[in-house]
Amino acid sequence: MKNPEKQDGAPFIVAELSANHGGTLARAKKLVALASRAGVDAVKLQTYTPDTMTLNVKSDHFRIDKNHRLWGGRYLHDLYTEAHTPWEWHRTIYESAKDLGITAFSTPFDYTAVEFLESIDNPIYKIASIEIAHLPLIAKVAGTGKPLIISTGAANLGEIDRAVETARHQGADDITLMVCTSAYPANDIDSNLSRIPLLQEAFGAKVGFSDHTTGIGSAIAAVALGATVIEKHFKLNKKETGVDSEFSVSPIEMAQLVLECRNAHRALGSPNAWNLASESTSHDLRPSIHVSENVTRGEVASAENLRICRPNGGLAPQALSRLIGKKFSKSLNRGHPTQWSDFT
């Protein structure tokens, strides 16, 4: 089983398939193949049916607000009918991912989904932001003993605390919290990535970023702030349309996200790294004091025959005031890097 944490500490990058399979298993498998080619560590599904998620009732109570940018006015049951991933596809998708060397895992939304996922040896569980107050579900998932990712979109610190406490009470010892803005799509300005170190300190847990923005900049910034997991919705190509497409990235964008997130992680380096070997040329180019005109033994050092200039090799610039007025101990040519022995 591959935990949501890599040996080298690099971020564990997840391609969320969600509804981007477009209703066919062949497209779902193609998404897995393209995600693998882009370099992700895992693909994630969502395990529900429209009937496990909601009731098939056509009333305003079961309708999404008409002002919602993507799904305004739609009935919940209709939306989930379009978006869900059939359970009979899961095993095939998991096997496809395994054959390609990546992990597949899922987000359950009720007990029956957890029981089904356990039957196919689901390796990691994620709790969706909207389920963070569903403490019985969190307890059920935590009881599996598998690594647990909890998304925190639209939650306050008290709700996060209750979710973490519930999970730990049931024995969960590998918890990753996800900073998330539960808006679809989300604006970068609402990412508030400064919450990453706050959650790390407050809950003593790993923290990642579930990214619903339309670009990749926020994900890269999250890595710089210590995110250990990056999740991004993934689609077949830039022109795809569908339930999740507007905040999903194409294979080319996902490959760029993977590359730049890993570059960002490598760039963090060590706080104790100074005067690096790779900087040797710059060190050699530091200015130092050189003879700027040919001089003879006994001649007085002055601002006319000494100059601070590149490269290194001569006396340090701050020594110039001490040299002015001294006599040269030998004749020297223009360009000579000065040494203390050059002066009486």
Image (cartoon, rainbow, N blue to C red):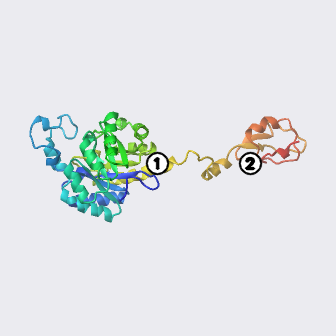
Give the SS element for disc 1: helix
Residue under label 2, please give it.
Answer: 313
CA–CA distance in space, label 1 to label 2: 35 Å
Q: Residue furthest right?
A: 298
Report the residue at 80% width, 43% height from top: 293
Residue 139 appears in view: yes
Q: Label 1: few (<14), some or many (≥20) within 10 Å?
A: many
Report the residue at 34% width, 42% height from top: 164
Q: How many marks?
A: 2
Give the SS element for disc 2: loop
In the rendered structure, the answer to whether residue 131 lies left or right of residue 305 reads: left
Amino acid carrying mark 2 in the image: Gly
Residue 166 in percent (x, y) is at 31, 42
Q: Label 2: few (<14), some or many (≥20) within 10 Å?
A: some
Which of 132/190 is in front?
A: 132
Q: Earlier in the sequence, mark 1 or mark 2?
A: 1
